[in-house]
Image (cartoon, rainbow, N blue to C red):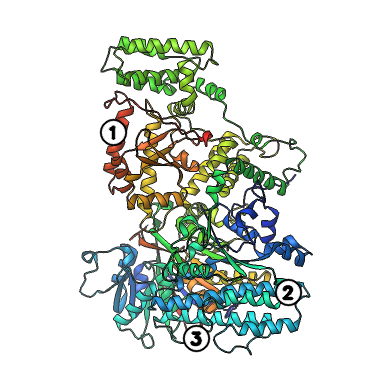
């Protein structure tokens, strides 16, 4: 019997070896895929930003030299010339860059030491590649190597010609210089004394730009090759360190270019040391936000996720198994939500439990009318044969009440008649019930889940892909946990039977818990940001599950641009950059000059507040709500605005304001 | 590849003594200088109060957030406080300077590590390793953690960095980096440090036997919450490849276990960079620090730590045993 292997166990590019990166590579559909995105032979530098798990590292490693040689095999020389670039991959995490700060040194001293260290570090990576190439090709003979080393020696500010005559010796020499820096820096951290014995032997940029230039001039193989510095994990650098590398980007010299990979929030500055000017997007660098790009290309992302799914199944042997149903679609691997099954389950429950909305309604009507009339109203609204219709009746009744109906009994009778009309011909789009269900069906089904104390269902591949919000890692983490639960439940995932709703649901819960733990914002900003997203979630939840929700499929909100002060903007930026929120378009209010920006809660955390994944309605936050949610230290202000909203949308409707409907349809964009 | 200074050092060479009660410890030992980190723990205060020592120093770490009115006020108490902006190196150096201790001539010295903040303890060990000195490290076992596995230890996380003095000479090639975490209950910190060295293979060292029998299960339950960050895509959470065990109250076995693992991996595939992170008991933290000073100085090894601005003043209840670990730093050279 074949051992069960979770095809989705690896969720991070860092956990793949170079060979596995190549094996599991999936390109984005359309054109030349990711080559068109990263443009490795273009000299224009690029910032590749994105949420955690959006695929930056996978992408950058794919274009690194280690992957190039795997792809080339025996045709290294010709393929290298064809590609026109060598990818020099550097993880900033390895630099342990925070040690270049504090310890009684001046900021100028640290700047000088770090730039020297970075120069030595990056040069070693270039030299490693040259050593590797020269061991594989015969193009570089000893004479060329020695001559090249002599030229490289001239890049130093002191005479180092005797230190190295081969690339291997050059590597050792650079290592030795790096060790000297490490020793001095480490020593000053113990003693607290200033660094005084360190000699900086090469000026900033000399090796980073000079090495490739000399290699291009001395070795024919590199005549048309660009040295592409792929600098990943940029967020790990301190601000002054980023400033230094930004300066290198600005002062870039052929044949080098840069691709910088960073979390969205990871760019601490765009400043340079060239007169403190900022790097200019468009003319000095291009910027790509990878998950945003994947979200915008919705069809392409769905296809991309589809391909990732099948590639994993293929490489872990699931597609080759005999009991697999041939040519199954991705959706067939997952049980979809079935309304009839849900209704059957409701039928097994005590009515007093799942029809709790009648109990609430009765209590609310007590002050308005007699028990006898209440009985009649509830009888009119009841529809045992179809819980969806019954719940719709209750919604319509609350609407009538909210709209100021003078005769609620008559209203309930009209609703009863409308329900009969709907049940006699459900395909008739003109019935009141059909109009309501067209917009609120998902909300009403979720309300029935809450009423009956059932968990709201987040299942089916379409929802799973949507919940991943253009971030492949979120997609993989959900699948990883679903697989685990499926095995735990005794199912045979990907072995012919689809993954149950229970396993899907629990897998999503685990993935959500991981996200909430993982996306914590460090430092003093952490708490206000966590409070803010929770308040937004709570408010949307209260309104969604109110008696007369003003919007359908509510998981988005909008803010008037003029309400966004510096503090609010900071929090919104954090929430967006840590992928809690997804920014939508900026729109103008109807018949007004007011501009509003829309944000949607990330689908993966929607279950935290029982919000929908596919969004349509948008909650328009007013100024006092923005203040209470984003800026208030105390929870009291927030509870106050929440209660105000609650009483507006719940019987007995103290505020009695006619709701307006704004539609924002996921399927429209 | 990493080069160890003395990969064969046997830490079990050092003595450790167990005392069933504080009185037993007090009767057996006396010192010229006794240093303890002040917090709300009865374990720390009782031992400090009763121990025989010519001079006793309280170190008050700013991360516990004590106000002036809450500080020790006995006439005999010598208290050292520090501003919150000071790093672990600055705190220890400032303490040594202000206390006027001459580590070359100080007599019998004992340090109660029970209430120490981990990075400060690691730096202190690194600092002491510069001297030919013998030190007793004392640790009191708790009976239980206050809220069992739900106990909060640290908050207001800021960032991960190398502990001062324990910064290595690292290698630009990162393909076989390792991160060994002494994993305790503080799962968020396990996640934080694992994310910081995302590319490293994660090895977790758990305290077994634990301080009390039920603490092992609680520990595993908590550490599992960080599984996504630590698993490296492995199928199982605990396996022979990625899990180590050492007694939670034995620094010397802890150091030996880490040493053996590193030696084996070195021989097998080689290690490009090694990171150590102490997040379990203070005793295992001591073990990790001793391993570093004996085997890793000026190699591509660093001790890293997820720094936080606040720590709980007391997380435990009761006192079950007192341990005394005698370290001869001269022997580590």
Q: Residues within 10 Å of mark 1 (few under 14, many from 20)?
A: some
- The answer to the question of whether label 1 and label 3 lie on touching residues, with beta carbons closer than 8 A, is no
Gap between marks 3 and 2 measured at Cα: 35 Å
Determine if marks 1 and 3 fall on one subunit.
Answer: yes
Image location (x, y in percent) of residue A20: 68, 57
Lower position in the chain sequence, tag 1 or tag 2: 2
Q: Residues within 10 Å of mark 2 (few under 14, many from 20)?
A: few
Q: Nearer the viewer, mark 1 or mark 2?
A: 2
Identify which residue, B68 or A232, lies in the foreground.
Answer: A232
Image location (x, y in percent) of residue A526: 38, 54
> Label 1: which residue?
A644
Element marked by disc 3: loop
Q: Is residue A654 above or below residue A586?
A: above
Lower position in the chain sequence, tag 3 or tag 2: 3
Q: Chain of mark 1?
A: A
Q: Is residue A8 above or below residue A554?
A: below
Q: Nearer the viewer, mark 1 or mark 3?
A: 3
Element marked by disc 1: helix
Apparent side of residue A511 relative to residue B271 in the rendered image (left or right):
left
Apparent side of residue A583 relative to residue B267 in the rendered image (left or right):
left
> Label 2: which residue?
A220
């Amino acid at each position: 019997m074949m051992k069960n292997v979770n095809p989705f166990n690896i969720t991070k590019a860092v956990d793949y070896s170079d060979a596995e990166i190549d094996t599991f590579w999936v390109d984005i559909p359309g054109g030349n895929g990711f080559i068109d995105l990263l443009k490795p032979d273009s000299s224009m530098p690029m910032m590749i930003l994105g949420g955690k798990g959006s695929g930056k590292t996978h992408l950058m490693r794919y274009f690194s030299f280690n992957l190039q040689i795997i792809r080339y095999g025996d045709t290294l020389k010709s393929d290298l010339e064809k590609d026109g670039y060598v990818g020099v991959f550097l993880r900033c995490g390895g630099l342990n860059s925070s040690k270049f700060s504090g310890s009684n040194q001046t900021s100028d001293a640290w700047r000088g030491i770090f730039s020297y260290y970075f120069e030595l570090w990056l040069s070693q990576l270039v030299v490693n590649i040259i050593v590797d190439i020269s061991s594989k090709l015969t193009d570089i003979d000893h004479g060329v190597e020695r001559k090249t080393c002599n030229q490289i020696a001239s890049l130093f500010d002191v005479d180092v010609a005797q230190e190295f005559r081969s690339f291997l010796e050059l590597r050792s020499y650079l290592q030795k210089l790096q060790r000297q820096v490490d020793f001095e820096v480490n020593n000053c951290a113990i003693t607290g004394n200033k660094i005084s014995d360190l000699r900086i032997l090469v000026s900033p940029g000399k090796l980073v730009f000079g090495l490739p230039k000399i290699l291009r001039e001395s070795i024919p193989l590199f005549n048309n090759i660009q040295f592409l510095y792929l600098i990943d994990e940029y967020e790990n650098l301190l601000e002054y360190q980023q400033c230094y590398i930004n300066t290198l980007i600005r002062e870039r010299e052929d044949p080098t270019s840069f691709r910088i990979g960073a979390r969205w929030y990871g760019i601490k500055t765009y400043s340079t040391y060239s007169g403190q000017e900022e790097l200019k997007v468009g003319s000095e660098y291009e910027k790509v936000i990878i998950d945003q790009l994947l979200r915008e290309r919705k069809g392409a992302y769905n296809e991309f996720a589809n391909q990732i799914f099948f590639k994993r199944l293929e490489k872990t042997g699931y597609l080759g198994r005999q009991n697999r149903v041939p040519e199954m679609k991705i959706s067939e691997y997952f049980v979809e939500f079935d309304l009839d099954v849900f209704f059957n389950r409701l039928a097994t429950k005590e009515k007093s439990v799942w029809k709790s909305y009648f109990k609430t309604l009765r209590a609310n009507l007590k002050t308005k009318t007699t028990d006898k009339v209440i009985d009649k109203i509830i009888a009119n609204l009841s529809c045992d044969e179809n819980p969806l219709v019954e719940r719709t009746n209750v919604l319509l009744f609350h609407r009538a009440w909210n709209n100021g109906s003078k005769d609620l009994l008559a209203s309930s009778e009209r609703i009863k008649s409308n329900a009969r009309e709907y049940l006699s011909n459900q395909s008739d789009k003109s019935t009141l019930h059909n109009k309501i269900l067209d917009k609120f069906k998902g909300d009403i089904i979720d309300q029935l889940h809450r009423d009956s104390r059932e968990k709201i269902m987040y299942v089916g591949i379409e929802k799973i892909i949507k919940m991943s919000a253009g971030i492949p890692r979120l997609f993989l983490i959900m699948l990883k946990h679903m697989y685990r639960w499926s095995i735990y439940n005794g199912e045979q995932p990907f072995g012919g039977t689809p993954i149950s709703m229970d396993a899907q649901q629990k897998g999503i819960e685990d993935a959500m818990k991981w996200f909430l733990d993982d996306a914590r914002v460090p430092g003093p900003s952490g708490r206000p940001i966590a409070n803010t997203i929770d308040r937004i979630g709570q408010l949307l939840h209260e309104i969604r599950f109110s008696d007369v929700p003003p919007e359908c499929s509510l998981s988005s909100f909008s803010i008037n641009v003029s309400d966004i002060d510096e503090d609010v903007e900071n929090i919104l930026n954090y929430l967006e950059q840590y992928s809690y929120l997804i920014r939508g378009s900026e729109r103008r209010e109807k018949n007004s000059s007011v501009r509003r920006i829309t944000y949607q809660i990330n689908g993966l955390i929607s279950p935290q507040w029982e919000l929908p994944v596919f969004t349509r309605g948008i909650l328009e936050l007013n100024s006092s709500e923005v203040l209470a949610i984003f800026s208030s230290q105390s929870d009291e202000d927030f509870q106050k605005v929440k209660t105000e909203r609650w009483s507006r949308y719940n019987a007995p409707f103290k505020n009695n304001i006619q709701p307006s409907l704004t539609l924002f349809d996921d399927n429209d964009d | 590849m990493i080069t160890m200074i003395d990969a064969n050092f046997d830490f079990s060479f050092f003595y450790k003594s167990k005392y069933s009660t504080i009185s037993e410890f007090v009767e057996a030992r006396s010192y010229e200088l006794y240093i303890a980190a002040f917090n709300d723990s009865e374990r720390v205060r009782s031992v400090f109060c009763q121990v025989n020592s010519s001079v006793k120093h309280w170190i008050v770490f700013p991360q516990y957030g004590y106000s002036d009115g809450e500080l020790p006020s006995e006439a005999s108490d010598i208290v050292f406080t520090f501003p919150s902006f000071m790093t672990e190196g600055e705190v220890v150096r400032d303490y040594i300077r202000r206390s006027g201790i001459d580590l070359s001539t100080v007599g019998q010295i004992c340090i109660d590590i029970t209430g120490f903040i981990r990075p400060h303890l690691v730096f202190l060990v690194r600092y002491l390793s510069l001297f030919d000195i013998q030190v007793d490290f004392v640790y009191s076992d708790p009976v239980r953690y206050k809220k069992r596995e739900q106990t909060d230890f640290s908050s207001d996380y800021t960032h991960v960095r190398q502990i001062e003095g324990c910064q290595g000479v690292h290698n630009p090639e990162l393909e076989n980096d390792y991160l060994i975490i002494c994993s305790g209950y503080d799962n968020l910190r396990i996640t934080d440090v694992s994310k910081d060295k995302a590319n490293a293979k994660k090895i977790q060292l758990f305290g077994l036997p634990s301080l009390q029998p039920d603490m092992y299960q609680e520990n595993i339950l908590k550490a599992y919450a960080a599984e996504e960050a630590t698993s490296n895509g492995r199928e199982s959470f605990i396996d022979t490849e990625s899990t180590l065990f050492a007694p939670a109250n034995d620094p010397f076995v802890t150091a030996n276990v880490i040493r053996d693992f590193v030696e084996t991996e070195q021989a097998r595939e080689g290690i490009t960079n090694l990171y150590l992170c102490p997040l379990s008991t203070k005793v295992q933290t001591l073990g990790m620090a001793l391993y570093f000073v004996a085997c890793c100085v000026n190699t591509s090894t660093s001790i890293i730590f997820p720094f936080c601005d606040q720590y709980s003043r007391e997380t435990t209840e009761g006192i079950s045993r007192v341990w005394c670990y005698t370290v001869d730093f001269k022997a580590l050279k």
